[in-house]
Structures are given as C-alpha cells and as structure tokens.
Amino acid sequence: MKLKARLVTGVLFITLVACGLLVLNGNLRVAVEFTADPAAGQGAGRAAQGAETSREEVLHEKKPWRLLQFGITRYSLYARNDPNVEEVLKAIRTQEVTYVEMKPGGTQLKLFMEFEDTSIGLFKPWRWPRDRETPPDHFYFTDYERHNAEIAAYHLDRILDFRRCPPVSGRWFNVTSEIRQKSEDEKLLKTFFVSPIGNVCFFGDCSYYCNTEHMICAIKDHHMLEGSVAAYLPRWQEAPRKTWKHPWKRSYSRVRKADWEVTDGETFCRQVRSTPPYDKGRRFGDLLDLTVYDFLMGNMDRHHYETFKAFGNNSAPIHLDQGRAIRKSTWLRLQLLAKEDYRLSDVMRESMRTDPIAPILTEPHLLALDRRVGIILDTVAKCIQKKGAENVLLEDLKDTTIANRLSIRRSFLCLAEEGPGCVKDPAPGTPSLRFSLVATCPGKSPRLSTDSDNKLL
C-alpha cells in the first residue's frame, strides 16, 4: 500500500512539474514575441501591446493613425495628399497623454507616449538650446540627440518628396502631470527629482546620458518641457521590419577607420553595387536618396536603416557624399531648391512655421541647408563633366507615373490657378511664401502603385 501511495505521489509530482514547464515555456515565448526586436522599438510594456486589427476594423474605426499606417506602400510611408497626416499631427499636438513608459534599449532616453485615441508616439526631450552647436572635437557618436532636428528632418523628407519619415511635431509637456503621473515605469519614476532652483527633472535609464550629470529638466515655469513626438510605425507583430547595415557607416572607433575610408571610392562603390540587395531593383537609388538626405541634415550617424519585410528587397528604406551617382528626379528637385524663388531655406522655414514650438531651426542652420544643396549640385556637375550624365544620373523618369511625381506644380508648389483646394497667394507683405509647401492639389498628384499587393497591411 505504501509503495502504491508513493507511486501515485510520484506521478502527481511529475505531472505538476511538466505542467509548470509548459506554462513557463509559454510565458517565455510570449516574452520573446514582445521583445523580439528591441531595435524596432517594440517594448514589452503596455505601449507595444494590443490585438491585431483587420483592414475592415480599421476602416470602421476611422482612427487617423491607423488609417495612416494602413496606407503604407513599398514606396513611402504615406501618400502626398493623405489627409490623415495632418490629423495625426493634430492629435500629437493636442490630445491628452494617457500613459508613458521608457523605450527599451538605445543610447539615449526616449519615451513611449500613449494618447487618448490609443495612438502611440515616440517622445524625445529638449536637451540643448537651438543655437548650441556641436563642438568640433566631439565624435559623431557622443552628441546629444536633438528634438528639433527630428522635426526638421520630417519636414525636409516631405519637401524632398521621399515621404519615408513618420510625421513628427513639437509639443510642450508638463513634466509632472503629463509624464511622471502618467507612468507606471518604476525605472523611470525613481529618477525624478526637484533641482536646487525648483525645476522638476528626471534622467531615466539608458546607456548614454542617463544620470544626474545629464538630467532633463523643465525649462519653463518649473514644470514645462518641450520635445518632439513622432507618430509610431505599426507594431512589429503586424509589420515586421528588417534591419540593414549601411554600406558607408562609420567605424564607431576613435582610432580605426571604416572600410570605405581606406578604399578607393569608385572601387568601393562598384563593390556595393554588385552586392545584394543593391545589385538590382530600387534599393541602390533609395540608398543614394538617403545619403543626400543625411548630408543635408548633417547626420553623420547613419549606421543602419530599416525596410518592411512584407515588400521584400524591393522596398524603400525607412528614414528611422560617398556615392558616385544620384537619381535624376532627386537631382532635378535639388536644382529647383537651389533657385532663388524656391530656396530650400525658405521652403523649410515656411513648412515649419506652424509647429507648436517654432522656430525649429535658427537662421544659420537654414542657410547651411542652402550651402549643402550647392555642394551636392557642384559635386554632381563635376561627375557629369568627367563621366557623362548617362553614367551619373540614375534614370527614374521614364515611367510617366514617376515623371508626374516630379512635376513642379503638382509636387509642392500648389498654386491657386491649378485647381480647387489649393492655398491661394497670401496678401502682399504677409510672412507666408506665395505657394503652399505642405499640401498638394487634391487629385492632381497620382499615388505610386495603389495596387493592394503594394500595401503593407
């Protein structure tokens, strides 16, 4: 009898252990799913959770941020005339914050913010005044991330008609009522304190600049802090991304140079062009667009870029002068932005004018954009003179759809005489330029590939 009882007890014990292992394995699997790609910003917390949504449910809900996500194609994150862009920016600027938590990973502090319509934004706080320039002795990997640069980058991306940067807006936040009191993140909450002059401060948890020597403090009325908020991409579970190393990335070493810095430029470029995914399709042209974009911004820290897996290798990079070529459409657009009537500095100034924390860039920064446009055009002109236009300009205007995409008056100079819905010329003496820089005439600019198989979700 005793032996039988021991056998029964042993069987029960083994059963309980097996069930426990199954539960543990299930929990581990769920944890892995929520933290599978920290680089993509999919944290394990509340901000990254939520059930998957079908296209029919999204159309029924009519939430601008979800409609914007469902409009992503292999070519861009949003259509040029998508009304949901402005609705998303309006929500970022005005809606109540309902929840805050730190974004896991990364070298500097960033916060997930959930708003009342359940949309999620990525917040970067004010760190430096607008006129503070990076010391020339600083390495590119030790500089502060600047919130106003995030906003300017979005406007530049849109003016260049790439549309691969998520919508970004500035906003003022109450550090106490809109950040500390909206968070349950213990790692974040334990870093809040009041400075000797009465400002509410915090520093969070990250690998760089997250300590009392690099605190983030209110800059107005002891509680108010400005920052940038970027509209969030679809969750990793809905739209997996693939991360690629940038061929011309830096070495991130104080003593060692990168391969492209010690190899002949043309030789290295040929090696890149013969290597997948740059040997066919649109990727190499997109990489050159990204290079132009980074040069205009002064971004020296582009080490990786992302694409959506759903589109395979024929997808444009997401914009989370070493090239030897440039897209013809990009070259023509830069020529336009170098003209006195349409200078990039003027276009950027007008585009950013309505942001809640404007002015976004100082005048020296705006003038630097014009100088950089000139440098790119001069470099391309020398290459054309040496090698011929057919060997320098990547032809992308043969397709009439793409040619229409470049059309000046259909692009971002939406003049009143072109059709209904355009912004009319302002009265003489007003600070506005004589054209609209952000909106385009409804129905005038065709979307690239509206076929369903080119949609992300």
Image (spheres, grey):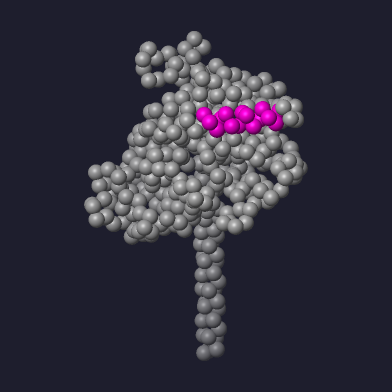
Label tally: 0
Q: Residue furthest front?
A: 137
- Expressed as whole percent of the image width and height from the top left, the position of residue 58 reads 49, 35
Q: Residue furthest bottom?
A: 2
Q: Which quadrant of the structure image shows residue 322?
A: top right
Question: Where is 226 relative to 64, above or below?
Answer: below
Q: Is 50 situated left or right of 189 in this image? A: right
Quadrant position of the C terminus in the picture: top right
In this view, 52 is above or below 359: below
Q: Residue at x 49, y 36 (%)?
A: 153
Using the rendered view, name the quadrant where residue 330 is placed.
Answer: top right
Foreground: 238 or 206? Answer: 206
The residue lying toward the viewer, choosing from 298 and 360, is 298
Q: What residue is rendered at 71% in x and 43% in y? A: 265
| Image point (66%, 27%), residue name | 381
Residue 284: image x %, image y %?
A: 68, 38
User: What range of the chain is rendered magenta?
Assistant: 370-384
Is 272 part of what is drawn in magenta?
Answer: no
Q: Is residue 457 visible?
A: no
Give percent across and percent down for residue 343: 51, 24
Q: Position of residue 154 (x, y in %)?
A: 49, 35
Q: Main secondary structure of the magenta part?
A: helix
Q: Residue at x 66, y 30 (%)?
A: 380
Eyeballing the image, is 121 above or below 35? above
Q: Nearer the viewer, residue 393 or 355?
A: 393
Q: Splitting the image into 4 quarters, where does residue 192 fall?
A: bottom left
**In this view of the protein, can residue 373 be seen by the observer?**
yes
